[in-house]
Amino acid sequence: MTDIQAVSLFHMYGVISLIALIIYIPRLLYYVSGFKKPRHLTNSVQNRFAVVIPARNESAGIGLLLDSLARQTYDRKKFDTFVVVDSEDDPTCAIAEKYERTYVQVVKNQTCKGMALDASFKELLSGTYGCYDAYIIIDGDNIASDNFIEEMNNGLASGAQIVLGKREVKNYLLGGKKLRSLATNCSALTYTFLDKLGNAFRTKAGIPCTMCGTGVMIRRDVIEEIGGWPYRSFTEDFEMTVNAIINGWSSYFYEYALVYTEEAISHKMLDRRRARWLIGYMQISFKYRNKIVKQTYASLHDPSLSFSEKIKGIRFKNFDFLYALNPLFLYFGNTAVCFLLYMIASCIDYFNRGFINFTALKYGLIIMLILYGVLVFYTFMALAVDPKALKITFAEKLAVLLYNPFFIAEYAYFYIAAFFTLLRDPHYGEQEVWQQIDRIETVIKEAE
């Protein structure tokens, strides 16, 4: 590769990256909303809730969640708790029976969270335990803030059919550095990326929020419409998000309703979870993309809609699903291809001509440094928009700022791996198999 060719390739890289940035500009609007203090709602009506906890083999940590529900500021007669297990012999059953208005539902042969929720909702819809206005899903390894249900009730005052609470990390509540690692801290930023840098704007713009399968409330009319919980993929919560787009269900991110969710300590365990998430994300995207494209096309040709309504539907609601990640794929792909071309050219020049092509190496290093800088800025935005989410030392936050770009870059591998997994088996994971992970309560006991 000559110096002229190296410079030309760098110019091409710059042009494509600029195009990606221009296309990504609408997504940058999301970040602004995260810095604005959300409105604190109040609800004069005390609704009745069913709190559903998928809790297969969760006896190690379920007590902390049930303790937190027993401390709720909301009227205890206004909500019931349902712990879903797969066997009467599960030790979780004996623990649950100690708590007021807490019932055990046994769903045998469940292979995924979706099956547990489906059976639970169908029984609750039958009226066996009375009528509920909404259903709250909390994972068995979580802890609810003392006013969580009270704030969820306030969230219903928004009029939304789906209300998402804010997720923070349980590890920081239960102990010191032994319950976290650098990878844990980086993974904890995922909730900030999803909520403060995403769902805050979606709420303002009327776009269905991206669901995370815990700390979420769904109104009765939605559960009645879908007849339970028909989703069975690795990312059943993302599938619910996509169905909210298709069916027009409204959603609302309400950060005053706070739950603490558990993050794995080991990088290896986090990698297993991320691999599953990427498979599920890609599978749901493939499954529903054409349907949303057709819905978009139909709305563009709907004579009952004004021009502004049509544009808003494309720019926001469907853009969020169809186009939001494509500019990133364009930029990351452009960087990867150009970097490889520079490295290949350097190797060819070295083996064929016996010299090191420092020009190619220089430009290859420059584009990777640019990518690193972009990801550092993205991480900084997350730390700035929600500085109290990571309850760690300043030195640890600095380590997250510098290391998180590499943690994010690992998603490229998981994305490629997910693509080839689904290429071999398009239905992979549609019947998700439970994968038990070590709970941090076990780590605490071992330390003692």
Image (cartoon, rainbow, N blue to C red):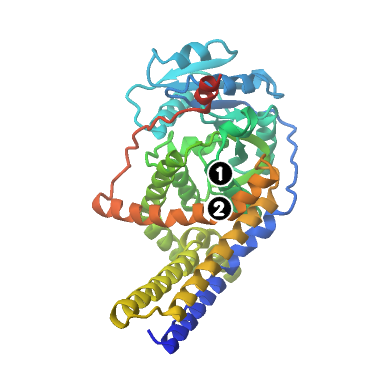
Q: Disc 2 residue type? A: Tyr
The residue positioned 52% from the left and 51% from the top of the image is: 248
Residue in view at x 40 percent, y 75 percent: 342
Label 2 environment density (alpha carbons within 10 Å; few <14, some 14–19, many ≥20): some
For the N terminus, which image quadrant? bottom left
Badge number at residue 182: 1
Which of 173 and 281 lies nearest the eye of the viewer?
173
Q: Position of residue 373 (x, y in %)?
A: 58, 64
Residue holding disc 2: 403
**Residue 105 percent coordinates (x, y):** 44, 19
Q: Nearer the viewer, residue 268 or 119?
A: 268
Task: Kindly tell me whether residue 257 is visible in this rendering.
Answer: yes
Quarter of the image where the C terminus is located: top right
- Vertical side of 62 occupied by 20: above or below: below
Mark 1 or mark 2: name the one nearer the start of the chain: 1
Q: How many marks?
A: 2
Q: Toward the viewer: 100 or 408?
A: 408
Q: CA distance from mark 1 to mark 2?
A: 8 Å
Q: Is residue 431 above or below residue 32?
A: above
- The residue lying at 43 percent from left, 35 percent from top is 229
Kindly indicate whether the residue at mark 2 contacts the one at mark 1 (C-beta within 8 angstroms). yes
Position of residue 349 measured from the top left corner of the image (x, y, whole percent) = 34, 80
Q: Can the viewer see residue 206?
A: no
* Residue at position x 68%, y 56% in the image: 33
Q: Element at badge 1?
A: helix
Q: Amino acid at mark 1?
A: Leu
Residue toward you, 319 or 423 = 423
Q: Secondary structure at mark 2?
A: helix
